[in-house]
């Protein structure tokens, strides 16, 4: 198997290193990742400046690695279009520090890299650990390695990627694996209003998370209840359910 | 009606100015937009630096206007959470110079601003003119004004926004209005590989558009055939159709 690894925490993030080391046991790995943290870049791509690519070296890990002065989506596009000769069998994005759940997925650079691969028709998996401090990537990396081996045997769904979130627990405390839908995860009181040393106002994004913890089919619920969550994601944003009712609006007079 | 206007071409873009002038004929308009062009920022939000807000003045247009050193999504979040007292009845994003069609919608700052509004539960419309040169915003702005008046009478679909693309034609050459789904619009040969004056390689994103023009239900087809396209968009990326088949995978041994 040829596997491309990228992320949005940057090429020197520990989650990427641990994943590259573990996956290189079972596949030929190439890393193409941003040269620094690019969290919350969503699906941004770089149109207005040149992209630079440089060879990188990962600590105690001999996989071929490149870093790019761009976003996670730039990395996947560049890897597939310009850097790698053979299309990979699978693209992995992560392991991200912090969850990518529910409504938040729309802001996620980690998930967007996997969406980019799916647009190219390549199976892809985004992986996150649902914690920010004292994160251990050892078990999550092993889980992804085993998942890759399962995926080799399966028909990967078309125009789809998998969004995996892993609770920050020892393996014996993990309740199981659930196939989920994206839940509701929003924020309230989103901005701190502050004064700078010159007396001018600035705003800093913050906000309390408001999660819907009732819906037992959701990724948010799964993580809260110590399950590993796997959500199939697609990139067709059409809301098919309302097309027919909008067609009934009388829009001809608008012309 | 209270209407918030934003965009991703920046607060001094002509498309936003023409829209603000036209919509202020029928509603109380507030503009909160990026201080410079933010195209292809997708749904990026600014976590790692403070946001600054400054009063702006639009040419021959007396609506209250603010510019933000952030992305389109930042602008909507800030407007709704910190700048505006009463929640708007509608958020308009645009008028964008250039189409936002098919697969490309996932990269669009224009659409992401409208998605952000929809996440807050506010009806939203993203508007683009499908041309880059010699764009006239006069008719498109009038169309949006008339659309706003229709929307006032309708039940706006929940958790949805409308993505409107208008062909760059005189009104008498427009074939009609179609309610569409997002089509397929991809790129091939995405990067120019070049040498800088120091002999170092760099890459610049480019690429030929590959559109699926067969699907008569798509936005891509509508614009190609001189129709105004309106696509309902949602922000739940779950691929529900494949959940059941993935549930049949035997994943317990992964633990």
Image (cartoon, coloured by chain):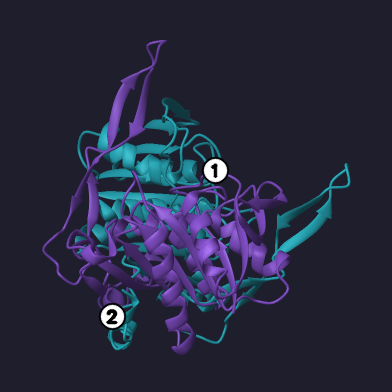
Chain colours: A purple, B cyan
The verdict on a common chain for dots 1 and 2 is: yes
Question: In the rendered image, which residue does mark 1 sit on?
Answer: B14
| A75 vs A3: above or below | above
Q: Residues within 10 Å of mark 1 (few under 14, many from 20)?
A: many
The quarter of the picture where the N terminus of chain B appears is: top left
Earlier in the chain: of badge 1 and badge 2, it is 1
- At 37% from the left and 53% from the top, the residue drawn is A136
- On residue A96, the disc is none
Q: Residue B24: give x, y in percent of width and height.
A: 35, 41
Q: Is residue B97 visible?
A: yes
Left or right of B64? Residue A69 is: right
Asked whether residue B63 appears in the rendered view, the answer is no
Residue in the picture at 51% in, 50% down: B41
Q: Residues within 10 Å of mark 2 (few under 14, many from 20)?
A: few
Front residue of A27/A97: it is A27
Tell me: residue B187, above or below residue B27: below
Q: How many marks?
A: 2
Q: Position of residue B236 (x, y in %)?
A: 31, 67
Determine whether, in the image, residue B188 is placed left or right of residue B237: right
Residue identified by numbered label 2: B252
Image-quadrant location for residue A240: bottom left
């Amino acid at each position: 198997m040829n596997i491309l690894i990228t992320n949005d925490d940057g090429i020197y993030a520990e989650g990427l290193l641990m994943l590259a080391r573990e996956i290189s046991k079972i596949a030929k790995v190439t890393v193409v990742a941003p040269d620094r943290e690019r969290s919350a870049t969503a699906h941004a791509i770089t149109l207005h400046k040149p992209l630079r690519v440089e060879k990188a070296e990962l600590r105690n890990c001999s996989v071929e690695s490149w870093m790019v002065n761009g976003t996670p989506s730039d990395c996947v596009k560049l890897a597939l279009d310009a850097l790698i000769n053979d299309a990979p069998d699978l693209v992995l994005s992560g392991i991200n520090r912090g969850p990518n759940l529910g409504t938040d997925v729309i802001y996620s650079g980690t998930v967007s890299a996997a969406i980019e691969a799916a647009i190219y028709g390549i199976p892809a998996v985004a992986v996150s650990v649902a914690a920010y401090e004292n994160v251990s990537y050892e078990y999550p990396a092993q889980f992804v390695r085993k998942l890759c081996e399962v995926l080799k045997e399966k028909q990967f769904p078309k125009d789809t990627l998998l969004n995996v979130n892993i609770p920050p627990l020892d393996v014996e405390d993990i309740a199981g694996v659930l196939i989920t839908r994206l839940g509701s995860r929003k924020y309230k009181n989103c901005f701190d209003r502050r004064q700078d040393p010159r007396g001018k106002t600035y705003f800093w994004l913050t906000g309390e998370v408001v999660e819907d913890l009732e819906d037992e089919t959701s990724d948010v619920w799964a993580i809260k209840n110590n399950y590993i969550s796997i959500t199939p994601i697609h990139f067709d944003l059409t809301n098919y359910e309302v097309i027919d009712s909008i067609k009934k609006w009388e829009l001809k007079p608008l012309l």
